[in-house]
């Protein structure tokens, strides 16, 4: 039984390597947009996080996101998600543009600074938090969960959360895929995006094959 199972795992891995399982087909690659933060990743995150998004699954994706990042609970039913929110001209201590803002109509807000490949701007942490209510949480979302480079030593705010595509978004997308089990188009679209995230964060199938073996 052990050898039969090992052979099955090997066959599945070989099918992936040859492309017969279809996992190499990815619309993001075909269109050449997989690396774009503003026009690809932020809009996808916005729609999935929005209870009124086109996915039609209500608040469940937003709930799973809040759980994965261990954030404070929201009034999920009232949540609104917006992208590219301008907060005025950039100065030394104010202004800029917020990539994603999640609000529930109260002072609770989640501000997301989404960085795939782009560099950081000067003083962005203090500028963004200076605009937001004191109860807001600033999420610095990068491929590997980096700490902000543009921040003075010893001045890290308590309401700054560092999150990664490699861990948090990957796990969250897997949660979303399970929740969308009865919505095939949504589930498969999430799967395509999950594969893109795994490639961008240098995850491949070999560790999963080893774990299965």
Image: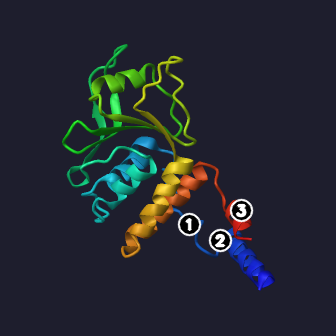
Residue in view at x 19 percent, y 42 percent: 105
Of the numbered discs 2 and 3, the one sitting upstream in the chain is: 2
Which is nearer the eye, 185 or 162? 162
Q: Which mark is residue 25?
A: 1
Please state if 139 lies on the left or on the right of 75 as rendered.
right
Circles 2 and 1 in contact, beta carbons < 8 Å = yes
**Residue linked to disc 3:** 206
Precedes in sequence: disc 1 or disc 3: 1
In the picture, residue 211 is in which quadrant?
Answer: bottom right
Q: Residue at x 55, y 43 (%)?
A: 143
Residue in front for this viewpoint, 87 or 144:
144
Q: Mark 2 or 3, which is nearer the eye? A: 3
- Quarter of the image containing the C terminus? bottom right
> 2 above or below 154?
below
Q: Position of residue 20 (x, y in %)?
A: 64, 76
Quadrant position of the N terminus in the picture: bottom right
Q: Dot 1: within a 10 Å radius of its alpha carbon, few (fewer than 14), some, or many (20 or more) residues?
A: few
At mark 1, the secondary structure is: loop
Residue at 51% in and 28% down: 148
- Does any portion of residue 9 appear in the rendered image? yes
Mark 2 lies on residue:
19
Q: Residues within 10 Å of mark 2 (few under 14, many from 20)?
A: few
- Tell me the element at label 3: helix
Look at the image and tell me whether residue 30 can be seen.
Answer: no
Sequence-first disc among 2 and 1: 2
Picture quarter containing residue 198?
bottom right
Residue 115: x and y, percent? 48, 37
Q: CA distance from mark 2 to mark 3?
A: 15 Å
121 w.r.t. 75: above or below: above
- The span from disc 1 to disc 3 (Cα, nearest Å) is 18 Å
Q: CA distance from mark 2 to mark 1?
A: 8 Å
């Amino acid at each position: 039984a052990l050898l039969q199972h090992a052979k099955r795992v090997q066959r599945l891995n070989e099918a992936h390597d040859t492309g017969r399982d279809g996992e190499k087909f990815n619309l993001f690659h075909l269109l050449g947009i997989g690396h774009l933060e503003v026009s690809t990743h932020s809009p996808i995150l916005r729609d999935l996080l929005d209870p009124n998004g086109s996915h039609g699954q209500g608040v469940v994706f937003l709930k799973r996101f809040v759980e994965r990042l261990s954030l404070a609970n929201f009034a999920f039913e009232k949540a609104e998600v917006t992208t590219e929110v301008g907060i005025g001209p950039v100065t030394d201590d104010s202004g800029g543009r917020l990539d994603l803002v999640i609000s529930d109509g109260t002072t609770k807000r989640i501000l997301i600074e989404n960085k795939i490949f782009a560099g950081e701007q000067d003083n962005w942490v203090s500028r963004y938090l200076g605009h937001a209510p004191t109860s807001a949480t600033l999420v610095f979302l990068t491929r590997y969960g980096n700490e902000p480079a543009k921040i003075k030593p010893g001045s890290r705010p308590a309401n700054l959360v560092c999150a990664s595509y490699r861990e948090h978004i990957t796990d969250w997308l897997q949660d979303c895929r399970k929740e969308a089990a009865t919505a095939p188009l949504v589930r498969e679209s999430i799967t395509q995006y999950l594969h893109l995230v795994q490639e961008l964060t240098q995850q491949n199938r070999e560790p999963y094959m080893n774990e299965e073996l």
